[in-house]
Amino acid sequence: MPVSDARGGQQPEGTHRPSGRDSAGDEIELTVPARAALLSLARLTVASVATRANFDFEAVEDLRLAIDELCSPLVSTTGEAGTLHFRFCWDDEQIEVFCRLARAVGGSPDDTPVEISAEEREWSDRALDALVDEHGSRDADDGGSVVWLRKRRFAAVMS
Amino acid sequence: MELTFTSDRLQEVPVLAVAGEIDVYTAPQLRERLVGLAEPGDGDAVVDLSEVTFVDSTGLGVLVGGLKRFREAGHDMALVVTQPQILKVFEITGLTSVFSIHPSASDAVSR
Protein backbone atom coordinates (compact mmCIF):
# COMPACT_ATOMS: atom_id res chain seq x y z
CA MET A 1 0.00 0.00 0.00
CA PRO A 2 1.35 3.45 -0.88
CA VAL A 3 2.34 5.74 1.95
CA SER A 4 2.45 9.51 2.00
CA ASP A 5 5.82 11.17 1.84
CA ALA A 6 6.78 14.31 3.73
CA ARG A 7 5.30 16.47 0.99
CA GLY A 8 1.98 14.72 0.92
CA GLY A 9 2.62 12.84 -2.30
CA GLN A 10 2.14 9.16 -2.85
CA GLN A 11 5.12 6.94 -2.42
CA PRO A 12 5.36 3.27 -3.42
CA GLU A 13 5.34 0.88 -0.52
CA GLY A 14 8.77 0.44 0.96
CA THR A 15 10.24 3.64 -0.41
CA HIS A 16 9.91 5.71 2.74
CA ARG A 17 13.07 7.24 4.06
CA PRO A 18 15.18 4.65 5.86
CA SER A 19 15.75 7.02 8.76
CA GLY A 20 12.07 7.87 9.06
CA ARG A 21 12.93 11.55 9.39
CA ASP A 22 10.56 14.23 8.21
CA SER A 23 13.26 16.49 6.92
CA ALA A 24 12.84 19.80 5.16
CA GLY A 25 15.52 18.69 2.71
CA ASP A 26 15.22 17.99 -0.97
CA GLU A 27 14.55 14.80 -2.80
CA ILE A 28 14.38 13.45 -6.31
CA GLU A 29 13.34 10.17 -7.84
CA LEU A 30 14.75 8.17 -10.70
CA THR A 31 13.18 5.14 -12.35
CA VAL A 32 15.17 2.99 -14.76
CA PRO A 33 15.03 -0.58 -16.08
CA ALA A 34 17.10 -2.87 -13.86
CA ARG A 35 19.75 -3.15 -16.53
CA ALA A 36 23.48 -3.32 -15.84
CA ALA A 37 24.19 -0.78 -18.56
CA LEU A 38 22.08 1.82 -16.75
CA LEU A 39 23.75 1.66 -13.35
CA SER A 40 25.95 4.51 -14.51
CA LEU A 41 22.84 6.73 -14.42
CA ALA A 42 22.44 6.04 -10.70
CA ARG A 43 26.11 6.89 -10.14
CA LEU A 44 25.72 10.09 -12.13
CA THR A 45 22.62 11.08 -10.21
CA VAL A 46 24.06 10.49 -6.77
CA ALA A 47 27.17 12.43 -7.76
CA SER A 48 25.01 15.35 -8.86
CA VAL A 49 22.97 15.22 -5.66
CA ALA A 50 26.08 15.04 -3.47
CA THR A 51 27.70 17.93 -5.31
CA ARG A 52 24.52 19.99 -4.93
CA ALA A 53 24.51 19.13 -1.22
CA ASN A 54 28.09 20.44 -0.96
CA PHE A 55 29.70 17.12 -0.17
CA ASP A 56 33.41 17.17 -0.94
CA PHE A 57 34.98 15.33 -3.85
CA GLU A 58 35.99 12.29 -1.82
CA ALA A 59 32.48 11.91 -0.40
CA VAL A 60 31.02 12.19 -3.89
CA GLU A 61 33.28 9.40 -5.08
CA ASP A 62 32.37 7.34 -2.02
CA LEU A 63 28.69 7.66 -2.84
CA ARG A 64 29.22 6.77 -6.50
CA LEU A 65 30.89 3.53 -5.51
CA ALA A 66 28.46 2.79 -2.70
CA ILE A 67 25.34 3.08 -4.83
CA ASP A 68 26.94 0.89 -7.47
CA GLU A 69 27.82 -1.79 -4.93
CA LEU A 70 24.36 -1.69 -3.42
CA CYS A 71 22.53 -2.01 -6.71
CA SER A 72 24.77 -4.28 -8.78
CA PRO A 73 23.13 -7.42 -7.32
CA LEU A 74 19.73 -6.09 -8.44
CA VAL A 75 20.43 -5.65 -12.12
CA SER A 76 20.50 -8.06 -15.00
CA THR A 77 21.97 -8.11 -18.46
CA THR A 78 18.77 -7.00 -20.16
CA GLY A 79 16.74 -5.33 -17.41
CA GLU A 80 13.59 -7.05 -18.59
CA ALA A 81 13.05 -8.59 -15.17
CA GLY A 82 12.15 -5.39 -13.41
CA THR A 83 12.54 -1.71 -12.67
CA LEU A 84 14.70 0.17 -10.20
CA HIS A 85 12.98 3.00 -8.33
CA PHE A 86 15.53 5.31 -6.74
CA ARG A 87 14.79 7.97 -4.18
CA PHE A 88 17.56 10.42 -3.31
CA CYS A 89 17.01 12.54 -0.19
CA TRP A 90 19.36 15.11 1.23
CA ASP A 91 19.56 17.92 3.73
CA ASP A 92 22.26 19.81 5.57
CA GLU A 93 23.35 16.73 7.50
CA GLN A 94 23.22 13.74 5.21
CA ILE A 95 22.29 12.01 2.00
CA GLU A 96 20.05 8.98 1.89
CA VAL A 97 19.49 6.80 -1.13
CA PHE A 98 16.78 4.23 -1.29
CA CYS A 99 16.31 1.80 -4.17
CA ARG A 100 13.55 -0.71 -4.75
CA LEU A 101 13.64 -3.40 -7.41
CA ALA A 102 10.12 -4.04 -8.65
CA ARG A 103 10.11 -7.32 -10.50
CA ALA A 104 8.19 -7.55 -13.74
CA VAL A 105 5.46 -10.16 -13.76
CA GLY A 106 6.79 -13.17 -15.59
CA GLY A 107 10.03 -11.49 -16.64
CA SER A 108 11.77 -12.39 -19.86
CA PRO A 109 13.32 -15.75 -20.73
CA ASP A 110 16.28 -13.82 -22.12
CA ASP A 111 16.90 -12.01 -18.86
CA THR A 112 20.09 -13.11 -17.13
CA PRO A 113 20.97 -11.99 -13.63
CA VAL A 114 24.43 -10.53 -13.28
CA GLU A 115 26.77 -13.07 -11.74
CA ILE A 116 28.56 -11.82 -8.63
CA SER A 117 30.98 -14.20 -6.94
CA ALA A 118 31.30 -14.74 -3.20
CA GLU A 119 34.65 -12.94 -3.28
CA GLU A 120 33.13 -9.96 -5.03
CA ARG A 121 30.29 -9.84 -2.49
CA GLU A 122 32.85 -9.79 0.32
CA TRP A 123 34.74 -6.90 -1.28
CA SER A 124 31.46 -5.14 -1.88
CA ASP A 125 30.49 -5.46 1.80
CA ARG A 126 33.89 -4.18 2.90
CA ALA A 127 33.60 -1.23 0.56
CA LEU A 128 30.10 -0.34 1.73
CA ASP A 129 31.12 -0.54 5.39
CA ALA A 130 33.98 1.85 4.67
CA LEU A 131 32.15 4.26 2.39
CA VAL A 132 28.84 5.02 4.10
CA ASP A 133 27.48 5.31 7.63
CA GLU A 134 24.62 2.89 7.15
CA HIS A 135 23.50 0.50 4.46
CA GLY A 136 21.12 -2.39 4.23
CA SER A 137 18.95 -4.61 2.11
CA ARG A 138 15.87 -6.75 2.46
CA ASP A 139 13.45 -8.71 0.35
CA ALA A 140 10.23 -6.92 -0.49
CA ASP A 141 6.78 -8.41 -0.10
CA ASP A 142 6.22 -8.40 -3.87
CA GLY A 143 9.27 -10.56 -4.53
CA GLY A 144 11.52 -7.63 -5.32
CA SER A 145 14.31 -6.19 -3.19
CA VAL A 146 14.97 -3.04 -1.25
CA VAL A 147 18.39 -1.49 -0.58
CA TRP A 148 19.38 1.77 1.06
CA LEU A 149 22.32 3.77 2.30
CA ARG A 150 22.97 6.83 4.39
CA LYS A 151 26.06 9.01 4.41
CA ARG A 152 26.42 11.82 6.87
CA ARG A 153 28.47 14.87 6.20
CA PHE A 154 31.76 14.91 8.12
CA ALA A 155 30.87 11.63 9.82
CA ALA A 156 34.48 10.93 10.67
CA VAL A 157 34.80 14.24 12.51
CA MET A 158 31.51 13.84 14.36
CA SER A 159 32.10 10.28 15.54
CA MET B 1 29.30 3.10 -21.71
CA GLU B 2 32.24 1.18 -23.10
CA LEU B 3 35.80 0.74 -21.96
CA THR B 4 38.63 1.62 -24.30
CA PHE B 5 41.85 -0.36 -24.46
CA THR B 6 45.34 0.34 -25.75
CA SER B 7 47.89 -2.44 -26.00
CA ASP B 8 51.60 -1.71 -26.01
CA ARG B 9 54.93 -3.20 -24.99
CA LEU B 10 57.39 -1.59 -22.64
CA GLN B 11 60.78 -3.25 -22.32
CA GLU B 12 59.18 -6.30 -23.97
CA VAL B 13 56.49 -6.45 -21.27
CA PRO B 14 52.90 -6.32 -22.55
CA VAL B 15 51.00 -3.34 -21.17
CA LEU B 16 47.23 -3.01 -21.43
CA ALA B 17 46.01 0.53 -20.79
CA VAL B 18 42.35 0.76 -19.83
CA ALA B 19 40.18 3.89 -19.90
CA GLY B 20 36.64 4.39 -18.64
CA GLU B 21 34.46 3.01 -15.87
CA ILE B 22 34.76 -0.65 -14.85
CA ASP B 23 31.47 -1.87 -13.45
CA VAL B 24 29.16 -4.85 -13.63
CA TYR B 25 28.33 -3.95 -17.24
CA THR B 26 31.82 -3.29 -18.60
CA ALA B 27 33.77 -5.85 -16.52
CA PRO B 28 33.20 -8.62 -19.13
CA GLN B 29 34.96 -6.43 -21.72
CA LEU B 30 37.97 -6.21 -19.43
CA ARG B 31 37.90 -9.95 -18.76
CA GLU B 32 38.03 -10.64 -22.48
CA ARG B 33 40.96 -8.28 -23.02
CA LEU B 34 42.90 -9.70 -20.08
CA VAL B 35 42.64 -13.17 -21.56
CA GLY B 36 44.14 -11.83 -24.77
CA LEU B 37 46.78 -9.71 -23.04
CA ALA B 38 49.44 -12.39 -22.98
CA GLU B 39 50.01 -16.03 -22.28
CA PRO B 40 50.74 -16.12 -18.55
CA GLY B 41 53.54 -18.61 -19.19
CA ASP B 42 55.39 -16.09 -21.34
CA GLY B 43 56.18 -13.65 -18.54
CA ASP B 44 54.82 -10.71 -16.59
CA ALA B 45 52.27 -8.17 -17.79
CA VAL B 46 51.02 -4.75 -16.72
CA VAL B 47 47.48 -3.38 -16.63
CA ASP B 48 47.50 0.41 -16.61
CA LEU B 49 44.44 1.84 -14.83
CA SER B 50 45.59 5.48 -14.98
CA GLU B 51 42.64 6.47 -17.15
CA VAL B 52 40.09 4.42 -15.25
CA THR B 53 37.69 6.74 -13.43
CA PHE B 54 35.65 4.10 -11.62
CA VAL B 55 36.05 0.48 -10.54
CA ASP B 56 33.72 -1.62 -8.42
CA SER B 57 33.91 -5.07 -6.86
CA THR B 58 33.03 -6.83 -10.11
CA GLY B 59 35.93 -5.04 -11.77
CA LEU B 60 38.17 -6.12 -8.93
CA GLY B 61 36.99 -9.69 -9.49
CA VAL B 62 38.09 -9.57 -13.10
CA LEU B 63 41.48 -8.13 -12.17
CA VAL B 64 42.00 -10.78 -9.48
CA GLY B 65 41.05 -13.45 -12.00
CA GLY B 66 43.70 -12.13 -14.37
CA LEU B 67 46.26 -12.00 -11.59
CA LYS B 68 45.56 -15.61 -10.64
CA ARG B 69 46.26 -16.76 -14.19
CA PHE B 70 49.67 -15.13 -14.15
CA ARG B 71 50.56 -16.20 -10.61
CA GLU B 72 49.70 -19.82 -11.39
CA ALA B 73 52.25 -19.66 -14.20
CA GLY B 74 54.87 -18.18 -11.85
CA HIS B 75 54.56 -14.64 -13.18
CA ASP B 76 52.89 -11.40 -12.17
CA MET B 77 50.30 -9.00 -13.48
CA ALA B 78 51.16 -5.60 -12.04
CA LEU B 79 48.79 -2.65 -11.94
CA VAL B 80 49.34 1.05 -12.53
CA VAL B 81 47.06 3.18 -10.39
CA THR B 82 47.43 6.95 -10.23
CA GLN B 83 44.00 8.24 -9.23
CA PRO B 84 43.36 8.43 -5.48
CA GLN B 85 39.72 7.29 -5.73
CA ILE B 86 40.79 4.16 -7.58
CA LEU B 87 43.60 3.41 -5.14
CA LYS B 88 41.08 3.82 -2.32
CA VAL B 89 38.97 0.98 -3.72
CA PHE B 90 41.95 -1.36 -3.52
CA GLU B 91 42.75 -0.13 -0.02
CA ILE B 92 39.30 -0.54 1.53
CA THR B 93 38.88 -4.01 0.05
CA GLY B 94 42.29 -5.14 1.27
CA LEU B 95 43.61 -5.78 -2.22
CA THR B 96 46.64 -3.53 -2.01
CA SER B 97 48.37 -6.47 -0.37
CA VAL B 98 47.37 -8.78 -3.22
CA PHE B 99 48.38 -6.69 -6.24
CA SER B 100 51.69 -5.13 -7.12
CA ILE B 101 50.55 -1.52 -7.60
CA HIS B 102 52.77 1.13 -9.23
CA PRO B 103 52.52 4.83 -10.06
CA SER B 104 53.57 4.38 -13.69
CA ALA B 105 53.99 1.70 -16.33
CA SER B 106 57.74 2.30 -16.49
CA ASP B 107 57.96 1.79 -12.74
CA ALA B 108 55.92 -1.40 -13.03
CA VAL B 109 58.13 -3.01 -15.68
CA SER B 110 61.39 -2.01 -14.01
CA ARG B 111 60.65 -3.84 -10.73
Image (cartoon, rainbow, N blue to C red):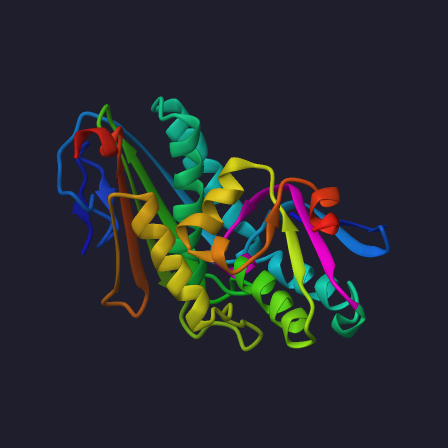
- How many discs mark residues in the rendered view? 0
Expressed as whole percent of the image width and height from the top left, the position of residue A110 reads 58, 74
**The C terminus of chain A is located in which quarter?**
top left
Which of B102 and B111 lies nearest the eye of the viewer? B111
Coordinates of residue A33 in the picture (x, y in percent): 48, 55
Which image quarter is the N terminus of chain A in? bottom left
Q: Residue furthest front?
A: B111
Identify whether A142 is placed above or below B20.
below
**Left-right relation of B29 to B97:** right
Answer yes or no: is residue A158 visible: yes
On screen, residue B99 versus residue A31, left or right, reads right
Residue A98 falls inside the magenta stretch? no
Please give the name of the residue rendered at 51% of the width and 60% of the height, measured from the top-left corner: B98
The answer, for residue A74, to whether it is visible in the render is no
Query: What secondary structure characterizes most of the magenta part?
Result: strand
The picture quadrant where one finds residue A28 is top left
- Between A114 and A63, the one lying in front of the other is A63
Residue at the (70%, 43%) spot, across then down: B107
- Residue B76 position, x and y percent, is 67, 63
Q: Is residue B81 left or right of residue A22?
A: right
Say which quarter of the image contains residue A8: top left
**Is A76 on the left-hand or right-hand side of A60?**
right
Residue at image location 81% in from the left, 70% down from the top: B42
B44 inside magenta stretch: yes
Q: In the picture shown, does residue B102 fall above or below A1?
A: above
Q: Which corner quadrant of the image does residue A73 belong to?
A: bottom left
Span of residues in magenta: B43-59
The x, y position of residue A129, in whole percent, is 30, 51
